[in-house]
Amino acid sequence: MSFMQDNVTMDSVNTVQQQAVQVATTGENLNLIQLLMKGGWIMVPIIFLLFLALVIFFERYITIRKASRRDSGLMSQIKGNVMSGRLDAAIAVCRSSNSALARMLQKGLSRVGRPIKDIEGAIENAGKLEVSKLEKNINILGIVAGIAPMLGFVGTIFGVIQIFRDVEVAGGIDIGSVSGGLYVKMIASASGLTVGILAYIGYHVLNMMVERVILRMETDSVEFIDLLDEPGA
């Protein structure tokens, strides 16, 4: 009797091993796209979120990089024209530069002759407008970072529910089918987490770039105000 039980146990182990090998062999034959598509219908919105995050990141990255370029001659030209009393020439320099800092300083130059507080207010308002342009759509990356992992978990949960329903219908547990089904459904969770992590990193990278631009704009605007506040300016 003990010998027969040992044989049954060995047969069960061999069967499980063969099923595992079949699942592994099937996985090896799948390419990345086919593997992702096995995650189910939930992969469609996850892939869409990935595409959306990539488009927003690279578009914002290019825009912020352009805004962060420093025109070393801008402040010196403006300073020379202001000290010479040529405000029109200084405004023309700002218009030709067509940068965030130049637009801020142009607002300040257009208020020259008014109290310093009015000039500071004009520059501050122009700066807020420029920052809002730089931050456009960045918050969408934060939303993607939160939604994508949740969609992945939802896909996995639906998949597990389907697996247990199939087990109930079959009236027994097929370890190979259950393990194979689980690994397929976990693709949704892994994909959602990956997209969420990438969006999270992109969100904070862009925010750090914007903060650097803001710091540079604030530094240059303070220098401009000091220039106007100098005696004889």
Image (cartoon, rainbow, N blue to C red):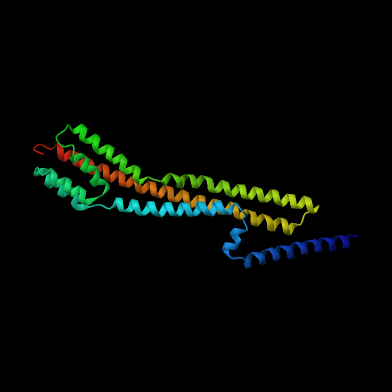
Q: Relative to the observer, which residue lies in front, 21 or 135?
A: 135
Check the image and report above or below for 147 versus 175: above
Q: Relative to the observer, which residue lies in front, 23 or 123?
A: 123
Residue displayed at 13% across by 43% down: 87
Across and down, in percent, residue 116 comes to 18, 33
Location of the C terminus (image quadrant): top left
Across and down, in percent, residue 219 comes to 25, 43
Across and down, in percent, residue 6 comes to 84, 61
Q: Relative to the observer, which residue lies in front, 173 or 147?
A: 147
Across and down, in percent, residue 222 comes to 22, 40
Position of 193 compared to 3: left or right?
Answer: left
Location of the N terminus (image quadrant): bottom right
Check the image and report above or below for 69 versus 23: above
Residue displayed at 57% across by 46% down: 150
Residue displayed at 55% across by 48% down: 149
Position of 117 compared to 62: left or right?
Answer: left
Position of 29 compared to 147: left or right?
Answer: right
Position of 129 compared to 113: left or right?
Answer: right
Residue displayed at 35% across by 49% down: 209
